[in-house]
Amino acid sequence: MHSLKFCMVLLIALLLIACEVRTKDSDVKSACRNQFEQANFDQAFETCLSEAEDGERDALFLLGSFYEKSGTEDHLNQACNLYEQAANKGSGYGMHALAYCYLLGKGREVNVQSGVSWLRQAAKQDFPLSLSTLGKAHYRGEYVDKDEKLSCSLHEKAANYAEPYSMAEYGSCLLAQGEHLGGLLWMYAALEFGEEREDTSKEELLSYIKDDGEQEFLNEVKILIEFSSKRRSVVLAENR
């Protein structure tokens, strides 16, 4: 048993190292995104405008988000046009945003088929929020067929990219399947990310763990969070 646990810890450590290497290789942010994330919005708008004219897909998406925030009909149309350009260049952010243009009828005529199609394309690129959104949709039967098994599968993928809502949902899936420890781990990790649920608290989850196993449980949660967060950083960088 201890040998198996050692192998699991070693495997996770190796995966974390691999993620670290991929993050360093892929997480080169543009000037547009750097200024945007530093909340230098006036400067970011001008920089994004310049980079978007050069066809930079992340700049196209971010410029679209500027226009969307204004909320006017003309600007919503411009936003969706920019999202579409970003999406066609492979931006997962652009695909997800364009999907909502169609699903909500903001800047586009409502077109559920197109909206779901763009969500699925982003999900194929492992864009976490699209995986989570499709998981929720399949659970509720909203926009797509109700399919709880597929919903759990999508939430599992999103959870492994540290998408908080999906971490909690995948935990619920595991509990329903009788995998209690795994379910508790994912639900506790979701709470650590701020995914609050009215009927769930850290204290309640820990009450199902034997006192002598509480620290080990918390250590496993820490490893789970670190692993999924590293994977999230990599996949988000790849989808910009």
Image: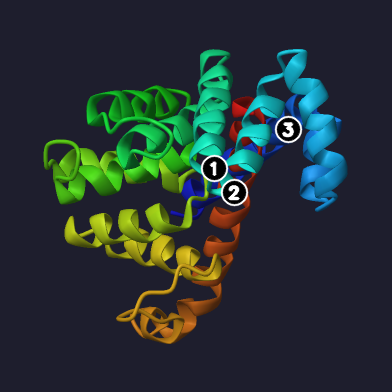
Q: Which residue is mark 3?
A: 23
Q: Residues within 10 Å of mark 3 (few under 14, many from 20)?
A: many
Quadrant in the picture for residue 83? top right
- Evaluate whether residue 211 shows in this view: yes
Which disc number belongs to residue 7?
A: 1
- Evaluate whether residue 92 shows in this view: no
Is 85 rendered above or below residue 23?
Answer: above
Q: Earlier in the sequence, mark 2 or mark 1?
A: 1
Q: Is residue 231 left or right of residue 54?
A: left
Which disc number belongs to residue 202?
A: none
Q: Residues within 10 Å of mark 1 (few under 14, many from 20)?
A: few
Quadrant in the picture for residue 29? top right
Residue 148 percent location from the top left of the image: 15, 46
Is 95 rendered above or below residue 207?
Answer: above
In the image shown, does 73 or 158 lie closer to the viewer?
A: 73
Q: Is residue 152 left or right of residue 207?
A: left
| Quadrant of image for the C terminus | top right
Contact check, label 2 and label 1, Cβ < 8 Å:
no
What is the C-alpha distance between the residues marked 3 and 2?
A: 30 Å
Q: Is residue 112 left or right of residue 92?
A: left
Q: What residue is at 41 percent from the left and 57 percent from the top?
A: 165
Residue 126 percent location from the top left of the image: 47, 30
Q: Earlier in the sequence, mark 3 or mark 2?
A: 3
What is the C-alpha distance between the residues marked 2 and 1?
A: 48 Å
Inspect the image, locate mark 2, and give the three-letter code of the amino acid beneath it: Lys
Q: Earlier in the sequence, mark 3 or mark 1?
A: 1
Is 227 rendered above or below residue 117?
Answer: below
Inspect the image, locate mark 1, and give the three-letter code of the amino acid beneath it: Cys
Q: Which residue is mark 2?
A: 69
Q: What residue is at 28 percent from the left and 33 percent from the top?
A: 110
Q: What residue is at 49 percent from the left and 64 percent from the top?
A: 189
